[in-house]
Amino acid sequence: MQIQDLPYPDPGVPDARSGPRFLWWLGRNQLGGQFKSLAWGLLHFVSVCALPFCVGLAVQAVVDRSGSRLALTGGLMALCGAGIAVGDTFLHRAAVTNWITAAARVQQLLARQAAHLGSALTRRVAAGEVVAVSTGDVEKIGWFVEALSRFLAAALTVVVVCVGLFVYQPALGVVVAVGMPVLAVSVLPLLPRATRRADVQREKAGRATELASDTVAGLRVLRGIGGEELFLDRYRRASQEVRHAAVSSARMWSLISAIQVLLPGLLLIVVVWHGVHLAREGRITVGELVTVYSAVMVMSYPLRHFEEIAMAYSFSRPSARRAARVLSLERVTDTVGTRAAEVPAGDLYDPATGLLVPSGRFTAVVCGDPDAAGRLAERLGGHPAEAGTSVLLDGVALDELPLASARTAVLVQDKDPVLLSGSLRELLDVPSSGAVGAAEALAAAQCGDVLVALAQGSLDTDDPMDARITERGRSLSGGQRQRLALARSLITDPEVLVLDEPTSAVDSHTEARIADGVRKLRAGRTTAVFTSSPLLLDQADRVVLVHEDEVVAVGTHRDLLRSEPRYRAVVTRETEEETALQNAVSDEAALRSTLDDHDVALRGALEEIEETA
Protein backbone atom coordinates (compact mmCIF):
# COMPACT_ATOMS: atom_id res chain seq x y z
CA MET A 1 0.00 0.00 0.00
CA GLN A 2 1.39 3.36 -1.09
CA ILE A 3 0.24 6.79 0.06
CA GLN A 4 -1.31 7.57 -3.32
CA ASP A 5 -3.45 4.41 -3.02
CA LEU A 6 -5.17 5.57 0.17
CA PRO A 7 -7.82 5.18 1.45
CA TYR A 8 -7.93 1.42 1.89
CA PRO A 9 -10.75 -0.31 -0.01
CA ASP A 10 -11.25 -2.35 3.14
CA PRO A 11 -9.22 -1.57 6.31
CA GLY A 12 -9.90 -5.08 7.61
CA VAL A 13 -11.23 -6.52 10.86
CA PRO A 14 -8.91 -5.46 13.72
CA ASP A 15 -7.83 -7.63 16.63
CA ALA A 16 -9.18 -5.35 19.38
CA ARG A 17 -8.78 -7.73 22.31
CA SER A 18 -5.93 -5.62 23.73
CA GLY A 19 -3.54 -2.83 22.81
CA PRO A 20 -0.51 -5.06 22.05
CA ARG A 21 -2.66 -7.41 19.97
CA PHE A 22 -3.94 -4.43 17.99
CA LEU A 23 -0.37 -3.24 17.35
CA TRP A 24 0.64 -6.75 16.28
CA TRP A 25 -2.37 -6.87 13.91
CA LEU A 26 -1.32 -3.56 12.36
CA GLY A 27 2.22 -4.83 11.87
CA ARG A 28 1.04 -8.07 10.25
CA ASN A 29 -1.09 -6.13 7.79
CA GLN A 30 1.93 -4.09 6.66
CA LEU A 31 4.52 -6.83 6.23
CA GLY A 32 5.42 -5.65 2.74
CA GLY A 33 6.16 -2.13 3.91
CA GLN A 34 7.98 -3.40 7.00
CA PHE A 35 10.29 -5.68 4.98
CA LYS A 36 10.99 -2.88 2.52
CA SER A 37 11.88 -0.51 5.36
CA LEU A 38 13.98 -3.24 7.01
CA ALA A 39 15.97 -3.81 3.81
CA TRP A 40 16.72 -0.12 3.28
CA GLY A 41 17.51 0.22 6.98
CA LEU A 42 20.03 -2.60 6.84
CA LEU A 43 21.71 -0.98 3.82
CA HIS A 44 21.91 2.34 5.62
CA PHE A 45 23.11 1.10 9.03
CA VAL A 46 25.57 -1.46 7.65
CA SER A 47 27.05 1.21 5.37
CA VAL A 48 27.42 3.56 8.33
CA CYS A 49 29.06 0.88 10.51
CA ALA A 50 31.35 -0.24 7.64
CA LEU A 51 33.07 3.15 7.58
CA PRO A 52 35.24 2.39 10.65
CA PHE A 53 36.59 -0.71 8.92
CA CYS A 54 37.46 1.42 5.90
CA VAL A 55 39.12 4.01 8.14
CA GLY A 56 41.15 1.28 9.86
CA LEU A 57 42.24 -0.16 6.53
CA ALA A 58 43.21 3.32 5.30
CA VAL A 59 45.29 4.03 8.41
CA GLN A 60 47.05 0.68 8.14
CA ALA A 61 47.66 1.28 4.43
CA VAL A 62 49.34 4.60 5.26
CA VAL A 63 51.42 2.95 7.98
CA ASP A 64 52.48 0.23 5.53
CA ARG A 65 52.95 2.81 2.73
CA SER A 66 50.66 0.85 0.40
CA GLY A 67 49.14 3.09 -2.28
CA SER A 68 47.05 0.36 -3.85
CA ARG A 69 45.37 -0.58 -0.60
CA LEU A 70 44.77 3.10 0.13
CA ALA A 71 43.08 3.53 -3.25
CA LEU A 72 41.02 0.40 -2.69
CA THR A 73 40.00 1.70 0.72
CA GLY A 74 38.99 5.00 -0.86
CA GLY A 75 36.76 3.14 -3.29
CA LEU A 76 35.19 1.19 -0.44
CA MET A 77 34.53 4.41 1.45
CA ALA A 78 32.86 5.92 -1.63
CA LEU A 79 30.73 2.81 -1.94
CA CYS A 80 29.76 3.08 1.76
CA GLY A 81 28.90 6.74 1.26
CA ALA A 82 26.60 5.85 -1.63
CA GLY A 83 25.00 3.11 0.48
CA ILE A 84 24.45 5.58 3.33
CA ALA A 85 22.81 8.15 1.03
CA VAL A 86 20.61 5.72 -0.88
CA GLY A 87 19.70 3.70 2.21
CA ASP A 88 18.81 6.77 4.29
CA THR A 89 16.70 8.28 1.50
CA PHE A 90 14.62 5.19 0.83
CA LEU A 91 14.51 4.20 4.52
CA HIS A 92 12.92 7.54 5.32
CA ARG A 93 10.51 7.17 2.43
CA ALA A 94 9.48 3.63 3.42
CA ALA A 95 9.23 4.47 7.11
CA VAL A 96 7.05 7.54 6.54
CA THR A 97 4.87 5.48 4.20
CA ASN A 98 4.42 2.90 6.97
CA TRP A 99 3.54 5.66 9.43
CA ILE A 100 0.96 7.35 7.20
CA THR A 101 -0.64 4.13 5.96
CA ALA A 102 -0.90 2.74 9.51
CA ALA A 103 -2.44 5.99 10.78
CA ALA A 104 -4.83 6.05 7.81
CA ARG A 105 -5.89 2.46 8.50
CA VAL A 106 -6.64 3.28 12.15
CA GLN A 107 -8.56 6.41 11.20
CA GLN A 108 -10.62 4.46 8.67
CA LEU A 109 -11.38 1.85 11.32
CA LEU A 110 -12.44 4.52 13.79
CA ALA A 111 -14.59 6.30 11.20
CA ARG A 112 -16.26 3.03 10.22
CA GLN A 113 -16.87 2.21 13.89
CA ALA A 114 -18.38 5.65 14.53
CA ALA A 115 -20.73 5.24 11.57
CA HIS A 116 -21.55 1.70 12.70
CA LEU A 117 -22.36 2.61 16.32
CA GLY A 118 -23.97 5.99 15.69
CA SER A 119 -25.22 7.70 18.85
CA ALA A 120 -24.26 4.67 20.94
CA LEU A 121 -20.56 5.60 20.60
CA THR A 122 -20.70 8.84 22.61
CA ARG A 123 -22.89 7.16 25.22
CA ARG A 124 -20.20 4.59 25.93
CA VAL A 125 -17.12 6.74 25.32
CA ALA A 126 -16.79 10.46 26.06
CA ALA A 127 -16.72 12.68 22.98
CA GLY A 128 -13.38 14.20 24.03
CA GLU A 129 -11.89 10.72 24.33
CA VAL A 130 -13.04 9.86 20.81
CA VAL A 131 -11.40 13.05 19.51
CA ALA A 132 -8.16 12.26 21.36
CA VAL A 133 -8.09 8.69 19.98
CA SER A 134 -8.68 9.82 16.40
CA THR A 135 -5.96 12.51 16.54
CA GLY A 136 -3.08 12.16 19.02
CA ASP A 137 -3.42 8.42 19.60
CA VAL A 138 -3.46 7.66 15.87
CA GLU A 139 -0.19 9.58 15.50
CA LYS A 140 1.50 7.62 18.31
CA ILE A 141 0.33 4.28 16.93
CA GLY A 142 1.71 5.21 13.52
CA TRP A 143 4.99 6.21 15.16
CA PHE A 144 5.46 2.74 16.65
CA VAL A 145 4.65 1.00 13.36
CA GLU A 146 7.12 3.27 11.58
CA ALA A 147 9.90 2.84 14.19
CA LEU A 148 9.61 -0.95 14.40
CA SER A 149 11.40 -1.77 11.13
CA ARG A 150 14.13 0.80 11.83
CA PHE A 151 14.72 -0.78 15.23
CA LEU A 152 14.95 -4.27 13.72
CA ALA A 153 17.46 -3.00 11.16
CA ALA A 154 19.50 -1.35 13.91
CA ALA A 155 19.41 -4.50 16.08
CA LEU A 156 20.56 -6.72 13.21
CA THR A 157 23.32 -4.23 12.41
CA VAL A 158 24.56 -4.32 16.02
CA VAL A 159 24.68 -8.12 15.88
CA VAL A 160 26.52 -8.07 12.54
CA VAL A 161 29.08 -5.52 13.77
CA CYS A 162 29.72 -7.40 17.03
CA VAL A 163 30.29 -10.64 15.12
CA GLY A 164 32.48 -8.82 12.60
CA LEU A 165 34.64 -7.24 15.31
CA PHE A 166 35.01 -10.56 17.07
CA VAL A 167 36.22 -12.17 13.86
CA TYR A 168 38.35 -9.16 12.88
CA GLN A 169 40.06 -8.71 16.24
CA PRO A 170 39.02 -11.24 18.93
CA ALA A 171 40.92 -9.55 21.76
CA LEU A 172 38.92 -6.32 21.45
CA GLY A 173 35.85 -7.85 19.78
CA VAL A 174 35.02 -9.89 22.86
CA VAL A 175 34.90 -6.67 24.93
CA VAL A 176 32.50 -5.10 22.45
CA ALA A 177 30.41 -8.28 22.15
CA VAL A 178 29.93 -8.34 25.93
CA GLY A 179 29.39 -4.60 26.33
CA MET A 180 26.85 -4.02 23.57
CA PRO A 181 24.07 -6.27 25.03
CA VAL A 182 24.57 -4.53 28.36
CA LEU A 183 24.07 -1.17 26.67
CA ALA A 184 20.97 -2.44 24.85
CA VAL A 185 19.20 -3.64 28.03
CA SER A 186 20.53 -1.00 30.42
CA VAL A 187 17.40 1.14 30.26
CA LEU A 188 14.88 -1.71 30.63
CA PRO A 189 14.47 -1.24 34.44
CA LEU A 190 13.47 2.39 33.85
CA LEU A 191 10.88 1.69 31.14
CA PRO A 192 7.96 0.67 33.43
CA ARG A 193 8.23 3.91 35.39
CA ALA A 194 8.56 5.94 32.19
CA THR A 195 5.52 4.14 30.76
CA ARG A 196 3.43 4.89 33.86
CA ARG A 197 4.33 8.56 33.68
CA ALA A 198 3.46 8.61 29.98
CA ASP A 199 0.09 7.00 30.80
CA VAL A 200 -0.62 9.65 33.42
CA GLN A 201 0.25 12.38 30.95
CA ARG A 202 -2.02 10.87 28.29
CA GLU A 203 -4.90 10.46 30.75
CA LYS A 204 -4.68 14.07 31.88
CA ALA A 205 -4.37 15.25 28.28
CA GLY A 206 -7.53 13.29 27.41
CA ARG A 207 -9.42 14.95 30.28
CA ALA A 208 -8.25 18.38 29.18
CA THR A 209 -9.31 17.67 25.59
CA GLU A 210 -12.73 16.50 26.74
CA LEU A 211 -13.16 19.59 28.92
CA ALA A 212 -12.11 21.88 26.06
CA SER A 213 -14.51 20.15 23.66
CA ASP A 214 -17.42 20.49 26.09
CA THR A 215 -16.57 24.15 26.81
CA VAL A 216 -16.40 25.10 23.14
CA ALA A 217 -19.65 23.25 22.38
CA GLY A 218 -21.49 25.07 25.18
CA LEU A 219 -19.75 28.44 24.91
CA ARG A 220 -22.91 30.29 23.87
CA VAL A 221 -24.83 28.92 26.83
CA LEU A 222 -21.93 29.56 29.22
CA ARG A 223 -21.77 33.19 28.16
CA GLY A 224 -25.50 33.50 28.66
CA ILE A 225 -25.36 32.33 32.28
CA GLY A 226 -22.05 33.97 33.08
CA GLY A 227 -20.18 30.70 33.55
CA GLU A 228 -17.52 31.27 30.90
CA GLU A 229 -14.72 32.21 33.30
CA LEU A 230 -15.59 29.31 35.60
CA PHE A 231 -15.06 26.75 32.85
CA LEU A 232 -11.98 28.56 31.55
CA ASP A 233 -10.46 28.32 35.03
CA ARG A 234 -11.20 24.60 35.04
CA TYR A 235 -9.46 24.21 31.71
CA ARG A 236 -6.47 26.23 32.91
CA ARG A 237 -6.09 23.93 35.91
CA ALA A 238 -6.43 20.86 33.69
CA SER A 239 -3.85 22.32 31.29
CA GLN A 240 -1.39 22.91 34.11
CA GLU A 241 -1.87 19.32 35.29
CA VAL A 242 -1.01 18.15 31.76
CA ARG A 243 2.10 20.36 31.78
CA HIS A 244 3.31 19.00 35.12
CA ALA A 245 2.69 15.42 33.96
CA ALA A 246 4.58 16.12 30.71
CA VAL A 247 7.54 17.56 32.62
CA SER A 248 7.58 14.54 34.92
CA SER A 249 7.52 12.19 31.94
CA ALA A 250 10.22 14.17 30.14
CA ARG A 251 12.53 13.93 33.16
CA MET A 252 12.39 10.14 33.04
CA TRP A 253 13.03 10.07 29.29
CA SER A 254 15.91 12.51 29.67
CA LEU A 255 17.43 10.16 32.25
CA ILE A 256 17.10 7.29 29.77
CA SER A 257 18.74 9.43 27.07
CA ALA A 258 21.60 10.32 29.44
CA ILE A 259 22.21 6.65 30.16
CA GLN A 260 22.23 5.93 26.42
CA VAL A 261 25.00 8.52 26.06
CA LEU A 262 26.96 7.69 29.20
CA LEU A 263 27.31 3.93 28.85
CA PRO A 264 28.61 3.93 25.24
CA GLY A 265 31.14 6.52 26.36
CA LEU A 266 32.30 4.27 29.19
CA LEU A 267 32.53 1.33 26.78
CA LEU A 268 34.59 3.46 24.43
CA ILE A 269 37.00 4.33 27.25
CA VAL A 270 37.36 0.65 28.17
CA VAL A 271 38.02 -0.31 24.52
CA VAL A 272 40.63 2.43 24.07
CA TRP A 273 42.38 1.63 27.35
CA HIS A 274 42.49 -2.10 26.62
CA GLY A 275 43.43 -1.52 22.97
CA VAL A 276 46.36 0.74 23.85
CA HIS A 277 47.77 -1.95 26.11
CA LEU A 278 47.35 -4.54 23.35
CA ALA A 279 49.00 -2.23 20.79
CA ARG A 280 51.96 -1.56 23.09
CA GLU A 281 52.40 -5.31 23.49
CA GLY A 282 52.25 -5.71 19.70
CA ARG A 283 49.19 -7.94 19.77
CA ILE A 284 47.18 -5.60 17.53
CA THR A 285 48.12 -3.07 14.89
CA VAL A 286 47.35 0.65 14.94
CA GLY A 287 44.84 0.17 12.12
CA GLU A 288 42.97 -2.49 14.08
CA LEU A 289 42.83 -0.23 17.15
CA VAL A 290 41.47 2.65 15.05
CA THR A 291 38.92 0.30 13.44
CA VAL A 292 37.57 -1.01 16.74
CA TYR A 293 37.55 2.47 18.28
CA SER A 294 35.68 3.94 15.31
CA ALA A 295 33.23 1.02 15.25
CA VAL A 296 32.32 1.47 18.92
CA MET A 297 31.92 5.21 18.40
CA VAL A 298 29.67 4.74 15.36
CA MET A 299 27.62 2.06 17.13
CA SER A 300 26.01 4.77 19.26
CA TYR A 301 23.98 5.71 16.16
CA PRO A 302 22.02 2.43 15.77
CA LEU A 303 21.81 2.15 19.57
CA ARG A 304 19.75 5.37 19.64
CA HIS A 305 17.00 3.43 17.91
CA PHE A 306 16.72 1.17 20.95
CA GLU A 307 15.67 4.23 22.94
CA GLU A 308 13.31 5.33 20.18
CA ILE A 309 11.49 1.99 20.02
CA ALA A 310 11.17 2.01 23.82
CA MET A 311 9.61 5.48 23.73
CA ALA A 312 7.41 4.61 20.76
CA TYR A 313 6.06 1.49 22.45
CA SER A 314 5.56 3.22 25.79
CA PHE A 315 3.52 5.99 24.18
CA SER A 316 1.70 3.83 21.63
CA ARG A 317 0.67 1.02 24.00
CA PRO A 318 -1.90 3.10 25.96
CA SER A 319 -2.99 4.75 22.70
CA ALA A 320 -3.50 1.32 21.10
CA ARG A 321 -5.40 0.17 24.19
CA ARG A 322 -7.80 3.12 23.91
CA ALA A 323 -8.22 2.61 20.18
CA ALA A 324 -8.87 -1.10 20.74
CA ARG A 325 -11.46 -0.23 23.38
CA VAL A 326 -13.36 1.92 20.89
CA LEU A 327 -13.01 -0.63 18.11
CA SER A 328 -14.20 -3.48 20.35
CA LEU A 329 -17.57 -1.84 21.02
CA GLU A 330 -20.47 -3.62 19.38
CA ARG A 331 -24.04 -2.74 18.54
CA VAL A 332 -26.86 -4.37 20.43
CA THR A 333 -28.42 -5.49 17.15
CA ASP A 334 -26.77 -6.72 13.98
CA THR A 335 -26.85 -4.11 11.22
CA VAL A 336 -27.17 -6.83 8.57
CA GLY A 337 -30.46 -8.11 9.99
CA THR A 338 -32.12 -11.47 9.55
CA ARG A 339 -34.83 -10.42 7.08
CA ALA A 340 -34.66 -9.41 3.47
CA ALA A 341 -34.29 -5.72 2.71
CA GLU A 342 -37.79 -4.22 2.63
CA VAL A 343 -39.51 -1.03 3.71
CA PRO A 344 -42.76 -1.96 5.49
CA ALA A 345 -45.62 0.51 5.87
CA GLY A 346 -48.27 0.48 8.58
CA ASP A 347 -48.81 1.07 12.29
CA LEU A 348 -45.73 1.56 14.48
CA TYR A 349 -46.02 -0.30 17.78
CA ASP A 350 -43.72 -0.58 20.78
CA PRO A 351 -44.54 -3.71 22.82
CA ALA A 352 -42.39 -2.54 25.75
CA THR A 353 -44.53 0.53 26.51
CA GLY A 354 -47.69 -0.22 24.56
CA LEU A 355 -47.22 2.89 22.41
CA LEU A 356 -49.14 2.75 19.12
CA VAL A 357 -48.54 5.26 16.32
CA PRO A 358 -51.33 4.67 13.77
CA SER A 359 -50.43 4.79 10.11
CA GLY A 360 -51.11 8.08 8.34
CA ARG A 361 -51.88 10.03 11.53
CA PHE A 362 -50.18 12.74 13.57
CA THR A 363 -49.46 11.33 17.05
CA ALA A 364 -48.00 13.32 19.94
CA VAL A 365 -46.25 11.54 22.79
CA VAL A 366 -45.90 13.12 26.23
CA CYS A 367 -43.28 11.84 28.68
CA GLY A 368 -42.57 13.36 32.05
CA ASP A 369 -38.94 12.17 31.88
CA PRO A 370 -36.96 13.73 28.98
CA ASP A 371 -34.33 10.97 29.15
CA ALA A 372 -37.00 8.29 28.90
CA ALA A 373 -38.49 10.16 25.94
CA GLY A 374 -35.09 10.16 24.19
CA ARG A 375 -34.64 6.42 24.74
CA LEU A 376 -38.14 5.68 23.50
CA ALA A 377 -37.65 7.86 20.40
CA GLU A 378 -34.41 6.03 19.60
CA ARG A 379 -36.10 2.65 20.08
CA LEU A 380 -38.86 3.63 17.63
CA GLY A 381 -36.21 3.95 14.93
CA GLY A 382 -35.02 0.37 15.37
CA HIS A 383 -31.51 -0.92 16.14
CA PRO A 384 -31.26 1.04 19.43
CA ALA A 385 -28.13 1.39 21.54
CA GLU A 386 -29.66 -0.56 24.42
CA ALA A 387 -31.00 -4.11 24.36
CA GLY A 388 -34.76 -4.57 24.54
CA THR A 389 -37.90 -5.64 22.75
CA SER A 390 -37.94 -4.64 19.10
CA VAL A 391 -40.44 -2.12 17.77
CA LEU A 392 -42.89 -3.43 15.16
CA LEU A 393 -43.76 -1.65 11.92
CA ASP A 394 -46.76 -3.29 10.28
CA GLY A 395 -45.97 -6.36 12.40
CA VAL A 396 -42.34 -6.53 11.21
CA ALA A 397 -39.59 -6.22 13.84
CA LEU A 398 -37.35 -3.30 12.84
CA ASP A 399 -34.33 -4.84 14.57
CA GLU A 400 -34.57 -7.82 12.20
CA LEU A 401 -34.38 -5.61 9.11
CA PRO A 402 -31.04 -4.42 7.67
CA LEU A 403 -30.05 -1.11 9.22
CA ALA A 404 -30.41 0.75 5.91
CA SER A 405 -33.98 -0.52 5.47
CA ALA A 406 -34.91 0.40 9.05
CA ARG A 407 -33.52 3.92 8.59
CA THR A 408 -35.42 4.29 5.31
CA ALA A 409 -38.68 3.24 6.94
CA VAL A 410 -38.35 5.25 10.16
CA LEU A 411 -36.37 8.47 10.53
CA VAL A 412 -35.68 9.72 14.06
CA GLN A 413 -34.56 13.30 14.66
CA ASP A 414 -33.19 13.61 18.18
CA LYS A 415 -33.47 16.68 20.36
CA ASP A 416 -29.92 17.85 19.54
CA PRO A 417 -29.54 17.44 15.76
CA VAL A 418 -26.18 18.27 14.19
CA LEU A 419 -25.69 20.54 11.18
CA LEU A 420 -22.63 19.72 9.09
CA SER A 421 -20.51 22.50 7.64
CA GLY A 422 -21.09 23.44 4.02
CA SER A 423 -23.68 25.28 1.99
CA LEU A 424 -27.39 25.13 2.75
CA ARG A 425 -27.91 23.36 -0.56
CA GLU A 426 -25.46 20.64 0.52
CA LEU A 427 -27.11 20.40 3.94
CA LEU A 428 -30.50 19.71 2.37
CA ASP A 429 -29.09 17.31 -0.25
CA VAL A 430 -30.14 14.13 1.58
CA PRO A 431 -31.66 10.84 0.44
CA SER A 432 -35.39 11.41 -0.02
CA SER A 433 -38.51 10.19 -1.76
CA GLY A 434 -38.57 13.31 -3.95
CA ALA A 435 -42.14 14.13 -2.93
CA VAL A 436 -41.12 17.09 -0.74
CA GLY A 437 -39.01 19.90 -2.15
CA ALA A 438 -36.57 22.13 -0.30
CA ALA A 439 -38.84 25.19 -0.58
CA GLU A 440 -41.81 23.29 0.90
CA ALA A 441 -39.78 21.90 3.78
CA LEU A 442 -38.20 25.26 4.60
CA ALA A 443 -41.60 26.94 4.54
CA ALA A 444 -43.15 24.29 6.81
CA ALA A 445 -40.25 24.66 9.26
CA GLN A 446 -40.64 28.48 9.19
CA CYS A 447 -37.07 29.09 7.98
CA GLY A 448 -37.75 32.39 6.21
CA ASP A 449 -35.75 34.49 8.65
CA VAL A 450 -32.94 31.90 8.57
CA LEU A 451 -32.63 32.30 4.79
CA VAL A 452 -32.49 36.09 5.18
CA ALA A 453 -29.79 35.82 7.85
CA LEU A 454 -27.71 33.46 5.70
CA ALA A 455 -27.99 35.74 2.65
CA GLN A 456 -27.00 38.81 4.67
CA GLY A 457 -24.06 37.03 6.27
CA SER A 458 -22.68 35.71 2.97
CA LEU A 459 -20.25 37.91 1.07
CA ASP A 460 -19.84 35.85 -2.11
CA THR A 461 -23.46 35.01 -3.01
CA ASP A 462 -26.95 36.43 -2.75
CA ASP A 463 -28.62 33.03 -2.93
CA PRO A 464 -29.15 31.73 0.64
CA MET A 465 -29.01 28.16 -0.70
CA ASP A 466 -25.33 28.74 -1.55
CA ALA A 467 -24.51 30.47 1.74
CA ARG A 468 -22.00 28.66 3.94
CA ILE A 469 -22.99 27.15 7.28
CA THR A 470 -20.17 26.96 9.81
CA GLU A 471 -19.25 23.83 11.76
CA ARG A 472 -22.29 22.54 13.69
CA GLY A 473 -24.11 25.73 12.67
CA ARG A 474 -22.43 27.77 15.41
CA SER A 475 -23.10 31.05 13.56
CA LEU A 476 -26.86 30.44 13.91
CA SER A 477 -29.05 30.63 16.97
CA GLY A 478 -30.41 27.52 18.63
CA GLY A 479 -33.86 28.05 17.15
CA GLN A 480 -32.48 28.60 13.65
CA ARG A 481 -30.40 25.41 13.83
CA GLN A 482 -33.42 23.50 15.08
CA ARG A 483 -35.63 24.69 12.23
CA LEU A 484 -33.02 23.87 9.57
CA ALA A 485 -32.67 20.39 11.03
CA LEU A 486 -36.46 19.99 10.95
CA ALA A 487 -36.54 21.08 7.29
CA ARG A 488 -33.85 18.51 6.50
CA SER A 489 -35.94 15.78 8.14
CA LEU A 490 -39.08 16.85 6.28
CA ILE A 491 -37.30 16.70 2.92
CA THR A 492 -36.47 13.02 3.42
CA ASP A 493 -40.23 12.27 3.58
CA PRO A 494 -39.84 8.90 5.34
CA GLU A 495 -42.67 6.44 5.86
CA VAL A 496 -42.54 7.22 9.58
CA LEU A 497 -41.04 10.43 11.00
CA VAL A 498 -40.20 10.62 14.72
CA LEU A 499 -39.36 14.07 16.10
CA ASP A 500 -37.99 14.55 19.61
CA GLU A 501 -38.74 18.08 20.89
CA PRO A 502 -38.45 19.72 17.44
CA THR A 503 -39.56 23.19 18.63
CA SER A 504 -38.02 23.49 22.09
CA ALA A 505 -35.80 26.45 21.06
CA VAL A 506 -38.37 28.63 19.20
CA ASP A 507 -40.91 31.18 20.42
CA SER A 508 -44.60 30.36 20.78
CA HIS A 509 -45.75 32.22 17.64
CA THR A 510 -43.22 30.44 15.45
CA GLU A 511 -44.01 27.17 17.17
CA ALA A 512 -47.71 27.51 16.32
CA ARG A 513 -46.90 28.09 12.64
CA ILE A 514 -44.46 25.16 12.61
CA ALA A 515 -47.09 22.88 14.14
CA ASP A 516 -49.58 23.83 11.45
CA GLY A 517 -46.98 23.56 8.66
CA VAL A 518 -45.73 20.12 9.72
CA ARG A 519 -49.29 18.81 10.08
CA LYS A 520 -50.22 19.94 6.56
CA LEU A 521 -46.98 18.76 4.95
CA ARG A 522 -47.16 15.34 6.62
CA ALA A 523 -50.85 14.81 5.87
CA GLY A 524 -51.44 11.14 5.14
CA ARG A 525 -48.00 10.18 6.48
CA THR A 526 -47.15 8.68 9.88
CA THR A 527 -45.66 11.21 12.28
CA ALA A 528 -44.80 10.90 15.98
CA VAL A 529 -43.71 13.97 17.94
CA PHE A 530 -42.31 13.81 21.47
CA THR A 531 -43.27 17.09 23.05
CA SER A 532 -44.98 18.77 25.97
CA SER A 533 -45.87 21.94 24.06
CA PRO A 534 -49.64 22.65 24.09
CA LEU A 535 -49.35 24.23 20.63
CA LEU A 536 -48.09 21.01 19.08
CA LEU A 537 -50.33 18.80 21.22
CA ASP A 538 -53.42 20.67 20.10
CA GLN A 539 -52.58 19.92 16.45
CA ALA A 540 -52.16 16.17 17.01
CA ASP A 541 -54.81 13.66 15.93
CA ARG A 542 -54.18 11.71 19.12
CA VAL A 543 -52.06 12.25 22.21
CA VAL A 544 -50.40 9.45 24.20
CA LEU A 545 -49.21 9.87 27.78
CA VAL A 546 -46.29 7.64 28.73
CA HIS A 547 -45.62 7.43 32.47
CA GLU A 548 -42.86 5.26 33.96
CA ASP A 549 -42.26 3.53 30.60
CA GLU A 550 -45.92 2.61 30.13
CA VAL A 551 -48.81 4.11 28.18
CA VAL A 552 -51.35 5.27 30.76
CA ALA A 553 -53.69 7.50 28.75
CA VAL A 554 -54.72 8.12 25.14
CA GLY A 555 -56.97 10.86 23.82
CA THR A 556 -56.99 14.40 22.50
CA HIS A 557 -55.10 17.24 24.13
CA ARG A 558 -58.19 18.97 25.51
CA ASP A 559 -59.77 15.76 26.82
CA LEU A 560 -56.59 14.71 28.64
CA LEU A 561 -56.23 18.16 30.17
CA ARG A 562 -59.63 17.77 31.80
CA SER A 563 -59.45 14.12 32.77
CA GLU A 564 -55.82 13.19 33.45
CA PRO A 565 -53.98 14.96 36.32
CA ARG A 566 -50.60 13.45 35.38
CA TYR A 567 -50.94 14.74 31.84
CA ARG A 568 -51.97 18.15 33.09
CA ALA A 569 -48.99 18.28 35.45
CA VAL A 570 -46.54 17.65 32.59
CA VAL A 571 -48.14 19.94 30.02
CA THR A 572 -49.00 22.88 32.26
CA ARG A 573 -45.80 22.50 34.36
CA GLU A 574 -47.73 22.26 37.60
CA THR A 575 -45.65 21.63 40.70
CA GLU A 576 -46.52 18.88 43.18
CA GLU A 577 -47.78 21.48 45.64
CA GLU A 578 -50.04 23.03 43.01
CA THR A 579 -51.34 19.62 42.01
CA ALA A 580 -52.00 18.69 45.64
CA LEU A 581 -53.73 22.03 46.27
CA GLN A 582 -55.91 21.62 43.18
CA ASN A 583 -56.82 18.08 44.23
CA ALA A 584 -57.65 19.34 47.72
CA VAL A 585 -59.87 22.06 46.28
CA SER A 586 -61.58 19.51 44.05
CA ASP A 587 -62.09 17.18 47.02
CA GLU A 588 -63.47 20.04 49.09
CA ALA A 589 -65.87 21.03 46.33
CA ALA A 590 -67.03 17.43 45.98
CA LEU A 591 -67.51 17.17 49.74
CA ARG A 592 -69.55 20.38 49.80
CA SER A 593 -71.67 19.12 46.92
CA THR A 594 -72.27 15.86 48.79
CA LEU A 595 -73.21 17.71 52.00
CA ASP A 596 -75.58 19.96 50.07
CA ASP A 597 -77.25 16.89 48.57
CA HIS A 598 -77.63 15.34 52.04
CA ASP A 599 -79.04 18.61 53.40
CA VAL A 600 -81.66 18.79 50.64
CA ALA A 601 -82.61 15.16 51.24
CA LEU A 602 -82.93 15.71 54.99
CA ARG A 603 -85.16 18.77 54.54
CA GLY A 604 -87.38 16.83 52.17
CA ALA A 605 -87.73 14.01 54.70
CA LEU A 606 -88.68 16.45 57.51
CA GLU A 607 -91.32 18.10 55.33
CA GLU A 608 -92.88 14.71 54.56
CA ILE A 609 -92.99 13.87 58.28
CA GLU A 610 -94.69 17.17 59.10
CA GLU A 611 -97.27 16.71 56.37
CA THR A 612 -98.02 13.19 57.58
CA ALA A 613 -98.41 14.36 61.19
Image (cartoon, grey):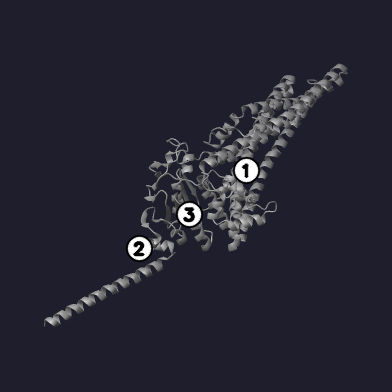
* Nearer to us in this view, 592 or 578: 592
x%, y% of residue 203? Answer: 59, 46
> Looking at the image, is 171 positioned above or below residue 200?
above
**Residue at the disc numbered 1:** 135
> Can residue 309 be seen?
no
Label pair 2/1, CB-CB below 8 angstroms: no
Q: Amino acid at mark 3?
A: Lys
> Looking at the image, is 533 positioned above or below residue 105?
below
Neighbours of disc 2 within 10 Å: few (<14), some (14-19), many (20+) = few
Instruction: Give the secondary structure at mark 3.
Output: helix
Determine the residue positioned at 57% across, 56% down: 447
x%, y% of residue 46? Answer: 73, 25
Mark in front: 2 vs 1:
2
Side (left or right) of 110 relative to 69 = left
Q: Amino acid at mark 1?
A: Thr
Mark in front: 1 vs 3:
3
Decide which of tag 2 and tag 1 comes sooner along the chain.
1
**Residue at the disc numbered 2:** 563
**Label of residue 520 in the image:** 3
x%, y% of residue 459? Answer: 70, 53
x%, y% of residue 114? Answer: 54, 42
